[in-house]
Amino acid sequence: MAESQPATTYPTTQQYARWKDRAKDFGMSVSEFIMHMVEAGLKKFDARVEADESRQELRQQRNDLKAELEHARDRINTLENRLHGTERETVRNFVQAHPGSTYEDVTQHVIDTAPDRVNGHLDALEGDAIETVNNRYYPTKSSTEEGISDAA
């Protein structure tokens, strides 16, 4: 057995309690714990941390995500244009089916068929631009952050 030399330290009450608990967890006396921790602290190690990914890899991932986002935005614009186009389609179809209709006739037809179209608009927007709470409609947080209009 190696010769030992006493060493003294003056930890705070909280530090000593923490050291005592950790020593118990390791099945050591407090003196053994202090000795092992000091030795562990004296070992040389490299504190530098290498990045998991290079800047070039991160740029590529960013560019890929930007391309995906642009594609998604284009798709949303296409769908919104198709959705709004159905309103014009309704008027065109009515006039084709009823040549010579008056402004009042067309307006009345749009009014009469509005609930069906509104349901379609609400279904299409729900979750992306609007949400339903207690049978009331509100813009989603993401739609207000991105400046998306909740008007159909």
Image (tube, rainbow, N blue to C red):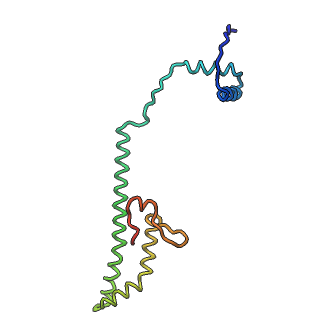
Number of numbered discs on residues: 0
Quadrant showing the N terminus: top right
Q: Residue 7: where, in percent of width, then height?
A: 65, 13
Q: Quadrant of the C terminus?
A: bottom left
Name the residue rendered at 37%, 58% in the picture: 72
Quadrant of res 82: bottom left
Residue at 64% x, 18% y is 9
| 44 on left or right of 144 | right
Residue 25 to residue 34: above or below: below
- Residue 143's place in the image compared with 65, above or below, is below
From this viewpoint, which residue is outermost toward the left? 100
Comparing 96 with 17, the one in front is 17
Which percent across, then down, holds residue 29? Answer: 71, 21
The one of 145 and 101 positioned closer to us in this rendering? 145
Residue in the picture at 66% in, 29% down: 14
Q: Position of residue 16 (x, y in %)?
A: 67, 26
